[in-house]
Amino acid sequence: MQKTIKKIGVLTSGGDSPGMNAAIRSVVRTCAYHNIECIGIYRGYQGMIEGDFKEMGPRSVNNIVNKGGTVLKSARSLDFKTPEGRTKAHENLLKAGIDALVVIGGDGTFTGGLLFNSEFDFPIMGIPGTIDNDIFGTSHTLGYDTALNTVVEVIDKIRDTASSHNRLFFVEVMGRDAGHIALNAGIGAGAEEILIPEENLGLDRLLESLQKSKASGKSSSIVVIAEGDKIGKNVFELKDYVEANLPEYDVRVSVLGHMQRGGSPSCFDRVLASRLGVKAVESLLEGKSNYMVGLQNDKVNLTPLEQAIKGKSEIDRELLRVSDIMST
Amino acid sequence: MQKTIKKIGVLTSGGDSPGMNAAIRSVVRTCAYHNIECIGIYRGYQGMIEGDFKEMGPRSVNNIVNKGGTVLKSARSLDFKTPEGRTKAHENLLKAGIDALVVIGGDGTFTGGLLFNSEFDFPIMGIPGTIDNDIFGTSHTLGYDTALNTVVEVIDKIRDTASSHNRLFFVEVMGRDAGHIALNAGIGAGAEEILIPEENLGLDRLLESLQKSKASGKSSSIVVIAEGDKIGKNVFELKDYVEANLPEYDVRVSVLGHMQRGGSPSCFDRVLASRLGVKAVESLLEGKSNYMVGLQNDKVNLTPLEQAIKGKSEIDRELLRVSDIMST
Amino acid sequence: MQKTIKKIGVLTSGGDSPGMNAAIRSVVRTCAYHNIECIGIYRGYQGMIEGDFKEMGPRSVNNIVNKGGTVLKSARSLDFKTPEGRTKAHENLLKAGIDALVVIGGDGTFTGGLLFNSEFDFPIMGIPGTIDNDIFGTSHTLGYDTALNTVVEVIDKIRDTASSHNRLFFVEVMGRDAGHIALNAGIGAGAEEILIPEENLGLDRLLESLQKSKASGKSSSIVVIAEGDKIGKNVFELKDYVEANLPEYDVRVSVLGHMQRGGSPSCFDRVLASRLGVKAVESLLEGKSNYMVGLQNDKVNLTPLEQAIKGKSEIDRELLRVSDIMST
Amino acid sequence: MQKTIKKIGVLTSGGDSPGMNAAIRSVVRTCAYHNIECIGIYRGYQGMIEGDFKEMGPRSVNNIVNKGGTVLKSARSLDFKTPEGRTKAHENLLKAGIDALVVIGGDGTFTGGLLFNSEFDFPIMGIPGTIDNDIFGTSHTLGYDTALNTVVEVIDKIRDTASSHNRLFFVEVMGRDAGHIALNAGIGAGAEEILIPEENLGLDRLLESLQKSKASGKSSSIVVIAEGDKIGKNVFELKDYVEANLPEYDVRVSVLGHMQRGGSPSCFDRVLASRLGVKAVESLLEGKSNYMVGLQNDKVNLTPLEQAIKGKSEIDRELLRVSDIMST
């Protein structure tokens, strides 16, 4: 028989992303709305092991809906990979009277949560929080939309100087093994060419494309490169390669880096976070466990955590064609 | 038998919205990609009547993907409401060798286009461009996502001063008869209460909600009000009413106004504009007419213009509940 | 003989402005640097009367340098205008062991501080914090630079829609009786005409200027109007007047309002706040009182509070000429 | 006897910076105001050699006051370093009837202009445009204020993720051999430590400061490093060094790069550009030559180009102390 849930713990884990605070706020306030207690757990699974807990009432999350980062901090926990660590974490949860967990993060976070559930039959609900959008079962992860806006705004600035100097820029963006950020921000920023892990364009095609672009009268160009791209060269080697083969180009490199993870979340990410938090808490209250809440066809749905981990979030191949046409 | 399309005209009409330029760019480049000529028509249907045309090659739309407004300008045309005006417009299209039209705008734009088609059997394809998101057949209109970000950024600033002074702010946002902007931006900005045309909350409920909010320990509040709200008072009268009934509140009013229509488009709007432009041109090339291209379940689809005009873009009622929970 | 200062109180009062938090942080950390205790006083003079105090160590101001508003809140205090109120405030300061005060605000704040000093011989140092830049003795008040950027960014958005529709916009900006914001933001935003309290342009001149502008081929225009402008009509009446006299113009009005007071401070305001906070605390430690710290010729200087209150911060009349030339 | 000036040429040269377009606009409109013709010269001195000229009337610079980059493009010209190149340039100016030049750029631009003047007695006026603020004779170069805002906004985003993960970030900013950007943006962004070329802090001091910071309870830190810093290690080597010596730190590196050169100019830069453009043109009309227009004590002044080139724009050493106190 299922236990009634009276207290829910919430944590953020893995790389932080904009919208995590809005999700924490939503979890906290949905608990309050249903007269459930809510406990914030600091620094992800590590804080669970160390008992780094804090009661969170609805006023404790005032004015964080628009803040980047995570007020609960995040960390990667080696201890949680050990049975001792997880046992300690479980004891802390029991001691604090916590009946269920909402874990906000990506693949690794969900894998940890699923393992924890399998060992202790502890109710878990996942919220996908990562800028990389590489989680199966949701069209958008928290922070992805914000990261896209951050990237296009930065490339807009780079384009100012690129077109003033007739230069070629290689811009490396985040995304781990996924090309979502590169593909969408590349189209949004009007990139000449986009290199993503899912599609090996090949070096010849890149050179050809750049030559065609020059011939067509373009005086400056932006190439957006996903960090996980498999072209076999890093972005600096790529610069050398292109300059060696196309001496008419003066290439500059910009690696955008961690700024992509920060910043005030977009309206979309704030609303998404609010919706996902409500669904996560209410699903736990309905007795569900081991699901991830996500967005599918603009509706909030549940996906089994196991599928979320094993599945692959495919890029929309229509966009490859759109990108191609846009660089006409 | 259907004529082969060799030259496409593109215009923007009605209120402008961020992403219109990205859509123009997409139409122009998709034409170039398919070796079709493209003609820009200035100032909407009025420019069609006045023959204010310009050839647009792929380089003519460099560096506009990130610009607000519309390089083709927009206007409301009284002349186009007369048979003489439309006849003149048709003659100009024929004279210029234009075989089909892409019209970017809202309801009024599509109504004009449909009428024109019915009179002259002239192929028309619509792209929904308005910040109000009030068009049936697409989950998002061009500019809506950008407007949401503009509104939450401004309310974030207002919140700084609201919470420094423990004040109540009434913020009026755009949306014509639709509450999409108010509802989503309200949730995104952490509004205490959201007044939209689709849901008559009633004045009593508003007072009650504000009293509860004060009692719950909130020291400042934001109420977001859609311009088309039907509560029976304009925003300044509402201020007077609340101050009369809740003297503990010092209310300030902010009417956001036209700034919501401008600004550099979000990544989402730029990508959407690129996708819709491709689909619009390619649908015309396939011999289709009288459709609007739109986004449904994250895919680009066609909706008959007639449905787009007659249908109603419903708000997502789940969001009303989310908003309610978030203001716990 | 002068008492050694061991504990300093800090408060913000009057309208809030971006950079106040950075100034609070600077006062707190400068105290820590000199091994002086620092006490935050909430809600300005009202909190002084109510004893709403909090000890502030250097870590208590982490991560606020970039936040708008004021963590110490602000309020206007009627009680402080009474001898009883001020006596109570003095008692609270003595009870808390506070030896000197840094007051952050504008005219009213300084007037209150000076009166308090005259009654109780209590050391006071002022930091000018207001977006209006209307304080004598400093070229820049805290928040002014940020407000200018906010205003030009908003007008940039308005211009997108203005130039898409060939419209005339009247944009009302803050500044109380001073035209600093209107004049500088007007030049920065490329306004056609700027109406400020310091210079009565006259209605005829405005009409003439708009007519000339139309004749010169400008298709859209922005007129920036200071809220304190003395042209004898409010911005809505001005719209009616212009439309009656220049029927070719379709005028839209935008009153920017309180958003101008919020937002993350510009780099300039953050650096200025940091410099002024250091100087304020160190001047108190040197035994000085009744001064305002300010910026003069890029250097931090002291101005007697009395002069700061009585003097007038003149606009730079060169800018009127620049504005005139820019609208050629 | 001095020739009456009837036609002025304007060019941008060297690295581009935000505000260059506003300065071009100001030069063009000031010419129009004085009924002088204005010729835009593309790609700096290279375009002068190639005769790449365009007449610019007051409407040709509509809507560029807020654009980053330079509509006249910029380039570094090797040909201009040869007597043949300069002779050709001079011939082109004479052929086009140009009587005087406004050159917008930095050191290199002014050096070229001065040489050109010495050879052909051609009137030259310089406007300092560079984000580095490394020009003697002006407190602010065009683009510097904007770059500061860009840098602090990006570091604000990085701080979100730094404080969520308790990490140390090394952020490299531009500035060539000058520490102005690093010092001011470092203070503005609340950096723990700032490394600039003008002040060799030394590696020991850096380690010590980081240790102290950890001890004082700070959980995350930002170190801002000027690209021209002389600490003897590049930013990646510095990361390795710190991690080797302070294993408790997990260091991330972010090199901000060219985005610092782009973006819409701040209000300050737009107003400054407007003022400098007016002064540059009017000084030429008064018969002056070989000066740079600049800002000194908030007033626009002239500095002989020779001094501007030879002098050094010193950092404000008060700021080093402020930075030190702020990181208490």
Image: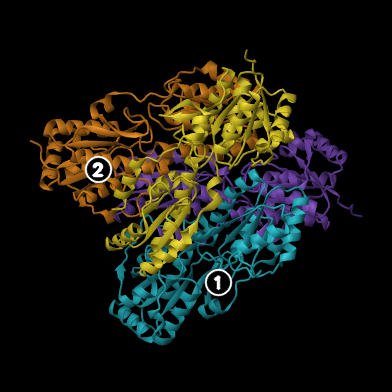
Chain colours: A yellow, B orange, C purple, D cyan
Image check: A218 left or right of B240?
left
Quadrant the N terminus of chain C occupies: bottom right
Q: Which residue is mark 2?
A: B11
Q: Which residue is mark 1?
A: D135
Amino acid carrying mark 2 in the image: Leu
Residue A301 point in image, percent of width and height: 47, 25
Say which chain tag 2 marks.
B
Residue D166 point in image, percent of width and height: 67, 46
Q: How many marks?
A: 2
Image check: C172 left or right of B325?
left
In what element is the residue under mark 1?
loop
Q: Is residue C319 visible?
A: no
Amino acid carrying mark 1 in the image: Ile
Quadrant the C terminus of chain C occupies: bottom left
Q: Residue at x 70, y 51 (%)?
A: C127
Q: Residue at x 53, y 69 (%)?
A: D294
